[in-house]
Amino acid sequence: MWFIAVGYCCFFFGTNFYLTWYPTYLREHRHMTLQALGVIGSIPLFAGMAGDLVGGSLSDFMFKKTGKARFARSIVAALGFLLSGVFLIPDATTESALASVLFLATSFFFLEFVIGPAWAVPMDVGGQFNGTVTGVMNMAGALAASLTPLVFGYYFGKGSWMFPFSLHQASCCWAP
């Protein structure tokens, strides 16, 4: 149960960036106009939505093929976390705003890859207590997400736009 909670902390810490700080990052660090932000800035959100569908479908496919729920959930989630972290590296090093958006979109696609398996796990292991497992998992994720305004805001306020991405990358690679 603790691994489920820690994994969801890592997921939600990264996801909360896209839901809260992403427009500020593009506007202030990548110097995008509001008009460009409205069009180009939505690409990662659509990529994330696709990642939800692909990750969940792949996890279910793996489960049907192997009959092993733990393997099917964990392999898809591990791949998603790993690739999400990998695609943050070129985002941090590129000078191009458009390339940044595309790297972030790819990173978010793979981060959202995790959501299907993450929500299937409590049903797989929780039995009659799956509501309790999902509640603990979601609470842990919300607590981690509540830290992002403090962490990201602190470093962004100091002009350090890349350090929070390093934390996000570390959480992706550290996730159980």
Image (cartoon, helix red, strand yellow):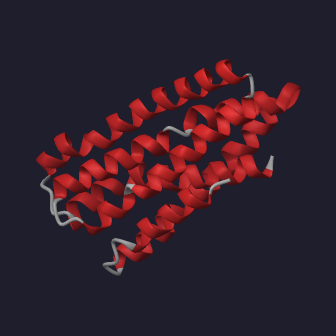
Counting from the top left corner in percent of width and height, residue 120 is at 68, 29
Q: Is residue 27 above or below residue 129?
A: below
Furthest residue in direction front, as rendered: 66
Whether residue 129 is visible, yes or no, is: yes
Q: Is residue 94 above or below residue 163?
A: above
Q: Nearer the viewer, residue 70 or 153?
A: 70
Furthest residue in direction top, as rendered: 64
Counting from the top left corner in percent of width and height, residue 143 is at 64, 56
Furthest residue in direction bottom, as rendered: 158
In the rendered structure, the answer to whether residue 108 lies left or right of residue 82 reads left
What's the residue at 78%, 38% (across, down)? Answer: 133
Q: Nearer the viewer, residue 33 or 174?
A: 174
Furthest residue in direction right, as rendered: 128
Residue 146 quadrant: bottom right
Q: Is residue 32 above or below residue 151?
A: above
Counting from the top left corner in percent of width and height, residue 94 is at 22, 65
What's the residue at 13%, 47% (across, down)? Answer: 36
Whether residue 146 is visible, yes or no, is: no
